[in-house]
Amino acid sequence: MKMTGKDHDHRSSGLEDHPTTMGMEDRSVYQLARDMAKLGFQAGQLGRSMEAWERMLQEEEITIFLGLAGAMVPAGLRKLISFMISERMVDCVVSTGANLFHGLCEGLGIVHYRGDPNADDAALREEGIDRIYDVYVSEEGLQKGDRYVAEFVKTLDLSQSYSSRELMEMLGRKMPATTLLGSASRAGVPIFVPALSDSSIGIGMVLAWREGHKVIVDQIKDVDEISQITEKSSQTGVVFVGGGVPKNFIQQTKVVADLCGRYRGGHNYAIQYTIDSPHFGGLSGCTFSEGVSWGKIAKEARMIQVFVDATIALPIVVHALGESGTRRKTSPSYAWKEGELTLSYEERR
């Protein structure tokens, strides 16, 4: 079909400042991300995700959930994610236990190294080196982390059960502020680990268990606590790094709220960085539009999914947000008493 001049103008009008047609003058990461929002495909999605996140930070009353899956800490994003927490770019974290454990290990001085993804794994085993693609870590170091968790468990009151949030808050008190646990404990950001047993934190707890320190982690209490956060928040936004259990654990709070007559509608903002595809039917790759059918996402929500490796996306987006100068006026504060949450929005200093 022949394209008229008018049609051509209409189709290109949104790309007048297309970064590829502009000069290579200096620009900040924030300006670059904003310019990327004018592009097509996943570059455009990445830029628009930054704009949506920035918009969330400008809301007067909103609770922002972070779902954290994948080996983000071993990959080197520990300080970046800790910065997100400390700066209250997010208000509640749901993570795999592995990310928290590897952060704990780094807090103890155990180092992750970059290595060869094509190495002889049998030889690495002989040397006591564990491999996560091109990241190496000492098995001896990880076992030091396991024993640290076991010793922590031995200090707990065996007469009561704990939610994972309570355990992570206590575990974070002695961790450096550059770890996820340490930054969250200082910032008053709750961390939930719904699959706590499926991690080295669970392994460390088993070590204590076999010595008679049988601490019970109440995962149903976790569901209740995080659902209360959703139910008592004026608005909610979600940022998913990967998918998996953290994504569903946050999403299902809307189902709980609906069943209990405390439904305020689906999430108002939804961002995801994932390499999973929707057409295989898995939750990790499912679209936010699909979530609308469940009532988990509001039909009018700002929904941005970026199909990209999160180790590429997060440094760009978070750096851009840091440069933007956008600072929240208020953020949620949580007070727990006998399992009941009081949530208020307090002015940030």
Image: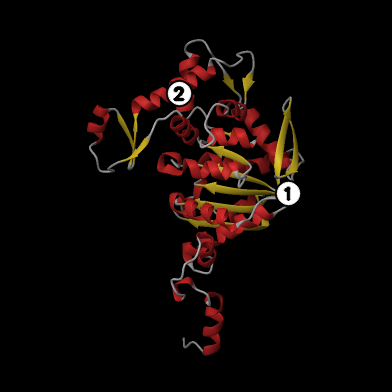
Q: Quadrant of residue 218?
A: top right
Residue 85: assigned label: none
Q: Quadrant of residue 108?
A: top left
Q: Nearer the viewer, mark 2 or mark 1?
A: 1
Few, some or many residues within 10 Å of mark 1 (<14, 14–19, 20+): many
Q: CA distance from mark 2 to mark 1?
A: 39 Å
Which residue is at a point 47% across and 88% down the rendered structure image?
A: 2
Q: Is residue 205 visible?
A: no
Instruction: Answer above or below: position of 200 versus 226.
Output: above
Secondary structure beneath label 1? loop
Instruction: Answer above or below: position of 83 versus 126.
Output: below
Which residue is at a point 74% across and 24% down the rendered structure image?
A: 338
Secondary structure beneath label 2? helix
Few, some or many residues within 10 Å of mark 2 (<14, 14–19, 20+): some
Picture coordinates of residue 205, whole percent (x, y):
49, 20
Residue tagged 2: 203
Picture coordinates of residue 149, whole percent (x, y):
49, 22
| Residue type highlighted by circle 2 | Ile
Picture coordinates of residue 16, whole percent (x, y):
53, 77
Instruction: Answer above or below: position of 108 versus 5.
Output: above
Looking at this view, name the residue that lies furthest to the top. Answer: 212
Which residue is at a point 59% across and 36% down the rendered structure image?
A: 184
Residue 61: assigned label: 1
Foreground pick, 110 / 237:
110
| Residue type highlighted by circle 1 | Glu
